[in-house]
C-alpha cells in the first residue's frame, strides 16, 4: 500500500511539467502503481487468514472447552473477543480508506493524462504492454511467496499444538459445542471424543479447512457457530470486493477473493457432497477424521433414499390405516411456556392412557361384542396434558427385587389382591405389594411351571430353540418375569379391564407388557414371528366365530412353533369344559395343528396341551372341507395397523429363501447372524446390501453403546431396566445392550421400512406404532427412552409438543431420555424438555448432528412433588 501512495504523490508533483514525454512516462508508472495497489490489497487476506488460524489454535491449546449452561453459546475459545473485533474492524476501515484515496488519485491522474497525451497514444500503449509483463512476473512471485508462507505457518501451528499436548489435525478447525447444565456430571477431557477411534482426514476436508469453511448458522435457534477465522474471512471478503472493480487488477481479485455469500454456499455444498459420499451404513465417514459421538463414526447412520424402493412400510401394508393430520409444525411451538402445561383432567387420573381411555369415542361405539371398547380409540387432537403422579409415589424398586415387590402407592390398586390373593397373584404386605411368583395355573411358583412345560416337551428348548414368546392374558406377568432366568423374552399382553391394573403391575415389576385386547383387530405384530404362544387360563373364547381369535394366533406363530394352552378344558371334566375341549380339538385339527402332548402337573393340579403349527402346506391341500378357508393371495399377513381380523389362514412359506421357511439359528447366535432370508440383492436401510447393512448396523451400535452411552451421558445403568427404542430399524441398539440386565421394546414406526420381522428373527421383540398417537402403556412405564433420528421424520406428519407430552407420560420420574437427531431438532426437543422441567444433562452438536441426554424429575403442574 505504501508503494501506491508514494507513486501517487510523485505523480501529483510531475503534473506541473509541460513536457509531453515526461507525462507519458508517469502515466505508465501510474498504471503500474495502481496495479501494485490492487495486488497488495489481495495478498493480505491470505496472510491474515493464516495468522488468525495460528492465534485461534494457540488459544484453544491454552484453554480446555468450557461447558456452558446455555447450549446456544460456543466455548470461550471459539468466540472472538470484542477487543479483537474492534481491532479488525479498525484495520479494515483503514485499508478501505487508503484504497479509496488511491482510487481517487488514479481517476484524477487519468483525467489529466487524457488531456495531455492525445498525440502520444502509441507510445503509451507500448509502455502499458511492458507494465503487463511486469505485472505477471510480480503476480507469480507473490503467489509462490504466499504458498510458501502458508505452508510454513501451517507447520508451525501443528508443531505448537503437539507441544501443548493436543492431537491436532485438520478437523480441529471445526466447531465442537458442549453444554452441561449439571456441571457435576461433566464429561472427561474432550468429552465424547475421548477413546474414540479416528480416521485420517481426507484431502477434501483439509482443502475446505484451508479455505476457512464456515459452520452454518441455524436460524431457528440463533446460535452463531462461527469461529475467529470465519469473522476475519468476512472482513477480508469485503475488502476484496472493494477492489474487484479496478480495471487492471480485476482478474486477480476474482481469482483470489470469493464473496462471502458465494464462499459460504460453495463450502456448504462441498460439505454435503462429502458427507453423502463418505457415509456408510455404520455411520463411518471416509471424508472426515472428526469423531461425532457414536464410537468413531463422524456421521449418524441415515436412511438411504433408494432403500425406500426395496422396503414396505406398515402404513402401506395396512389396509385401514388411520389418516393423520399432516399439517406442518407451527414454528412457534417449541416456545411452549411452562405455564401452558396442565394436568390431565380425566377419570383415569394417574393411570391415563389417551388411546384406551377416550371416553367420548367409547360412548359412540355401536357394539362392544368384540371388546371394541378395549381397543385403541385415539383422540383426534393428541393431548398435551400431563398425567398426575399418584399420591405418595416413590422411585421404583430396582430389578430383580422388583419382581417380588413394588411400592403400594406407585400402583395403589387392591382389587387383584382381593380377588386373586388365594392364587398367589399379588398380596398387600405393609407398604408393599408382593408377588409370590404364582398364578392361576401355577400357584406354587412360575419356575416349577416353566420346568414342567420343558419336561412335557423337550423340543421346546427354553433359551435356545425357543427365545421369543407371546403370553396372552398374562395377568401380572409372573410367567414372563421368571422366563428371564431361562434366557427367554416374553411379550406379555392383557387388556385394561376389570382385572385392575394387571399390566401396570407387570411394568412396575420391570417385566415387559403392553395393554391390548384380542377383539376385532389384528395385534400390532408381523406374521410368523413368535416361537411359542402361551395362554394359561386366559379366558379367551378361542373356539367362537369359526376360531377367529385362534386364527390370529396362527398368523403370529412361526411355522413349527408351539401353542401352549393351560386351561381347565384341558384337564377338567365339567360339562362346559368338556364341550369347549371338543370344539377346540375340532378347530385345531382343521387348522392342521398337531396336538403334540397333553400332560398334567401333579404339584399344581393343572394340565397343559401343546399344539404345533405345520411347516408345510401339505395338510392344507388334503383337507376335505376348506374350513377355516385359506386367505386370498393378495391378503398381506404382515399388515397389522388397524386391520380387521379375518377368519382365514395364510399359506406356509416353502421357498428356501422366504421368511418362515426355516427356523432361526439357536439363541444367542441368532442375535448377530443376518437372517437367512435377507437377500444380498436387496438394498439395506443405509444403502448397503441388506446382510452387510445388518452387520454394519450391529457393529455401529456396539461401538456407540460401549464408548459413549455407557460412560459419557451421565446414566447410571444399574437403575435402568425397562427400555424403549422409539425408532428401532434393525434392533441394533437393543442387541448392543444384551449383556445388561435390561429388556428393550423395539418400536418400528408405521411409515418406516418394515424391519420388525428382522428384529424378531434375531431373538428380540417389538411392536408397530405411530408416534402421532399415544402408546398403549400406562404412565411411568419405562426407565429409558431412546430416539435416533425419529423427530426429524416425525415433524413431517405431526407436532412435537404432544409427542413430548407422551414421552413425559411413559417415562418414570428419574428416568432418562437419549435423543440423536439433526442439531436444530435436538435444540427444539431440548426447549420442550426444559419447559417440562426435565434436567438436560448434556447436549452435543457437530456437523449439523446432535445428541441430548436428559432426566425426568418429579415436577408436575400446580404442585412439585419430591421422592421420600
Image (spheres, helix red, strand yellow):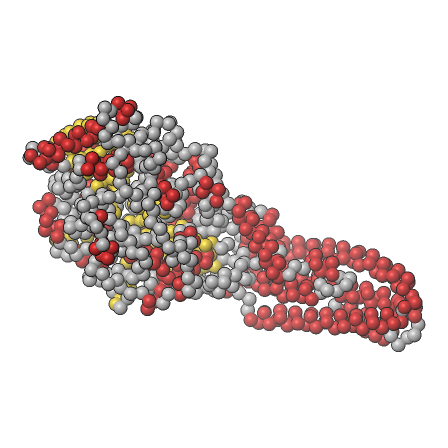
Say which quarter of the image contains residue 128.
bottom right
Q: Residue at x 30, y 59 (%)?
A: 383
Q: Is residue 284 above or below residue 114?
A: above
User: Count the marks: how many?
Assistant: 0
- The front one of 155 and 474 is 474
Image quadrant containing the N terminus:
bottom right
- In x, y percent, where is residue 95? 69, 70
Query: Along the horizontal axis of the image, is 130 left or right of 447?
Result: right
Quadrant of the image occupied by residue 757: top left
Tell me which residue sits at (16%, 47%) in the image: 435
Residue 50: percent from left, percent from top: 64, 59
Q: Residue shown at 57%/58% (left/top)? A: 214
Residue closest to the eye, 172 or 202: 202
Q: Considering only vertical position in the picture, is 285 above or below 391?
A: above
- Residue 781 visible in this rendered orientation of the protein: no
Asked if residue 131 lies left or right of residue 304, the reply is right
Q: What is the residue that sits farthest to the left in this orientation?
A: 574
Along the horizontal axis of the image, is 70 left or right of 25? Answer: left
**Which quadrant does the C terminus fall into?**
bottom left
Residue displayed at 21% across by 28% down: 590
Residue 71 in view here: yes
Residue 83 on image: x %, y % = 57, 72
**Could you tell me residue 679's position as x and y percent?**
43, 33
Q: Can you name the residue that lies furthest to the bottom here?
A: 16
Amino acid at each position: 500500500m505504501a508503494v501506491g501512495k508514494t507513486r501517487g504523490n510523485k505523480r501529483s508533483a510531475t503534473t506541473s511539467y509541460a513536457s509531453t514525454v515526461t507525462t507519458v512516462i508517469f502515466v505508465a508508472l501510474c498504471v503500474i502503481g495502481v496495479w501494485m495497489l490492487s495486488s497488495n490489497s489481495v495478498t493480505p487476506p491470505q496472510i491474515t487468514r493464516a495468522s488468525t488460524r495460528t492465534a485461534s489454535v494457540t488459544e484453544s491449546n491454552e484453554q480446555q472447552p468450557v461447558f456452558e449452561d446455555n447450549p446456544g453459546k460456543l466455548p470461550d475459545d471459539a468466540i472472538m473477543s470484542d477487543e479483537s473485533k474492534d481491532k479488525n474492524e479498525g484495520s479494515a476501515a483503514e485499508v478501505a480508506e487508503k484504497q479509496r484515496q488511491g482510487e481517487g488519485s488514479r481517476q484524477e491522474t487519468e483525467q489529466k493524462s487524457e488531456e495531455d497525451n492525445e498525440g502520444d497514444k502509441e507510445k503509451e500503449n507500448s509502455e502499458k504492454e511492458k507494465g503487463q509483463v511486469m505485472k505477471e512476473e510480480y503476480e507469480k512471485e507473490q503467489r509462490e511467496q504466499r504458498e510458501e508462507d502458508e505452508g510454513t505457518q501451517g507447520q508451525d501451528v501443528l508443531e505448537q499444538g503437539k507441544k501443548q499436548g493436543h492431537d491436532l489435525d485438520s478437523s480441529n478447525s471445526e466447531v465442537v459445542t458442549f453444554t452441561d447444565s449439571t456441571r457435576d456430571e461433566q464429561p472427561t477431557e474432550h468429552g465424547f471424543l475421548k477413546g474414540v477411534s479416528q480416521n485420517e482426514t481426507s484431502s477434501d476436508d483439509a482443502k475446505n479447512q484451508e479455505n476457512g469453511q464456515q459452520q452454518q448458522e441455524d436460524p431457528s435457534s440463533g446460535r452463531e457457530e462461527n469461529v475467529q477465522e470465519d469473522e476475519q474471512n468476512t472482513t477480508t471478503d469485503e475488502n476484496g470486493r472493494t477492489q474487484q472493480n479496478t480495471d487492471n487488477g480485476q482478474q486477480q481479485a476474482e481469482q483470489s477473493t470469493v464473496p462471502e455469500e458465494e464462499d459460504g454456499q460453495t463450502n456448504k455444498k462441498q460439505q454435503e457432497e462429502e458427507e453423502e459420499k463418505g457415509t456408510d451404513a455404520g455411520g463411518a465417514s471416509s471424508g472426515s477424521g472428526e469423531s461425532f459421538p457414536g464410537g468413531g463414526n463422524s456421521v449418524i447412520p441415515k436412511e438411504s433414499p433408494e432403500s425406500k424402493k426395496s422396503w414396505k412400510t406398515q402404513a402401506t401394508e395396512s389396509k385401514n390405516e388411520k389418516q393423520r393430520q399432516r399439517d406442518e409444525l407451527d414454528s412457534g411451538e417449541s416456545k411452549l411456556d411452562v405455564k401452558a402445561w396442565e394436568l390431565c383432567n380425566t377419570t383415569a387420573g394417574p393411570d391415563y392412557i389417551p388411546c384406551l381411555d377416550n371416553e367420548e369415542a367409547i360412548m359412540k361405539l355401536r357394539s362392544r361384542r368384540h371388546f371394541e371398547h378395549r381397543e385403541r380409540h385415539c383422540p383426534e387432537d393428541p393431548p398435551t396434558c400431563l398425567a398426575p403422579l399418584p399420591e405418595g409415589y416413590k422411585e421404583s424398586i430396582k430389578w430383580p427385587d422388583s419382581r417380588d415387590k413394588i411400592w403400594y402407592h406407585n400402583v395403589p390398586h387392591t382389587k387383584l389382591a382381593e380377588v386373586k390373593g388365594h392364587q398367589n397373584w399379588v398380596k398387600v404386605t405393609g407398604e408393599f405389594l408382593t408377588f409370590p411368583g404364582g398364578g392361576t395355573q401355577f400357584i406354587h411358583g412360575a419356575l416349577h411351571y416353566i420346568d414342567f412345560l420343558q419336561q412335557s416337551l423337550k423340543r421346546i428348548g427354553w433359551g435356545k430353540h425357543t427365545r421369543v414368546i407371546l403370553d396372552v392374558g398374562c395377568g401380572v406377568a409372573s410367567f414372563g418375569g421368571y422366563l428371564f432366568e431361562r434366557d427367554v423374552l416374553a411379550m406379555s399382553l392383557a387388556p385394561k379391564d376389570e382385572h385392575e391394573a394387571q399390566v401396570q403391575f407387570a411394568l412396575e415389576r420391570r417385566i415387559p407388557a403392553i395393554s391390548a385386547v384380542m377383539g376385532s383387530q389384528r395385534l400390532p405384530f408381523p406374521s410368523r414371528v413368535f416361537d411359542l404362544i402361551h395362554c394359561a387360563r386366559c379366558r379367551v373364547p378361542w373356539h367362537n366365530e369359526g376360531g377367529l381369535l385362534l386364527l390370529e394366533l396362527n398368523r403370529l406363530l412361526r411355522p413349527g412353533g408351539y401353542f401352549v394352552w393351560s386351561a381347565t378344558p384341558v384337564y377338567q371334566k365339567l360339562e362346559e369344559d368338556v364341550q369347549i375341549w371338543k370344539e377346540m380339538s375340532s378347530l385345531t385339527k382343521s387348522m392342521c395343528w398337531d396336538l403334540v402332548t397333553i400332560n398334567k402337573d401333579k404339584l399344581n393340579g393343572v394340565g397343559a396341551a401343546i399344539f404345533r403349527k405345520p411347516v408345510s402346506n401339505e395338510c392344507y391341500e388334503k383337507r376335505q372341507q376348506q374350513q377355516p378357508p385359506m386367505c386370498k393371495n393378495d391378503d398381506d399377513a404382515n399388515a397389522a395397523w388397524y386391520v380387521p381380523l379375518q377368519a382365514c389362514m395364510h399359506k406356509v412359506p416353502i421357498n428356501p429363501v422366504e421368511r418362515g421357511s426355516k427356523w432361526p439359528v439357536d439363541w444367542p447366535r441368532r442375535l448377530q447372524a443376518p437372517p437367512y432370508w435377507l437377500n444380498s440383492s436387496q438394498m439395506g436401510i443405509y444403502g448397503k446390501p441388506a446382510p452387510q447393512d445388518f452387520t454394519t448396523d450391529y457393529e455401529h451400535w456396539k461401538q456407540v453403546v460401549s464408548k459413549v452411552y455407557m460412560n459419557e451421558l451421565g446414566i447410571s445403568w444399574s437403575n435402568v431396566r425397562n427400555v424403549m427404542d422409539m425408532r428401532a430399524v434393525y434392533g441394533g441398539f437393543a442387541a448392543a445392550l444384551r449383556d445388561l440386565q435390561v429388556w428393550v421394546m423395539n418400536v418400528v414406526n408405521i411409515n418406516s421400512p418394515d424391519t420388525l420381522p428382522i428384529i424378531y428373527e434375531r431373538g428380540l421383540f417389538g411392536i408397530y406404532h405411530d408416534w402421532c398417537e399415544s402408546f398403549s402403556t400406562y404412565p411411568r412405564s419405562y426407565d429409558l427412552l431412546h430416539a435416533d433420528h425419529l423427530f426429524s421424520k416425525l415433524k413431517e406428519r405431526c407436532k412435537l409438543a404432544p409427542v413430548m407430552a407422551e414421552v413425559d407420560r411413559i417415562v418414570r420420574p428419574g428416568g432418562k431420555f437419549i435423543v440423536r437427531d439433526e442439531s436444530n431438532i435436538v435444540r427444539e426437543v431440548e426447549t420442550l424438555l426444559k419447559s417440562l422441567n426435565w434436567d438436560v444433562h448434556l447436549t452435543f452438536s457437530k456437523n449439523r448432528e446432535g445428541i441430548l441426554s436428559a432426566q425426568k424429575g418429579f415436577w408436575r403442574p400446580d404442585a412439585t412433588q419430591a421422592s421420600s
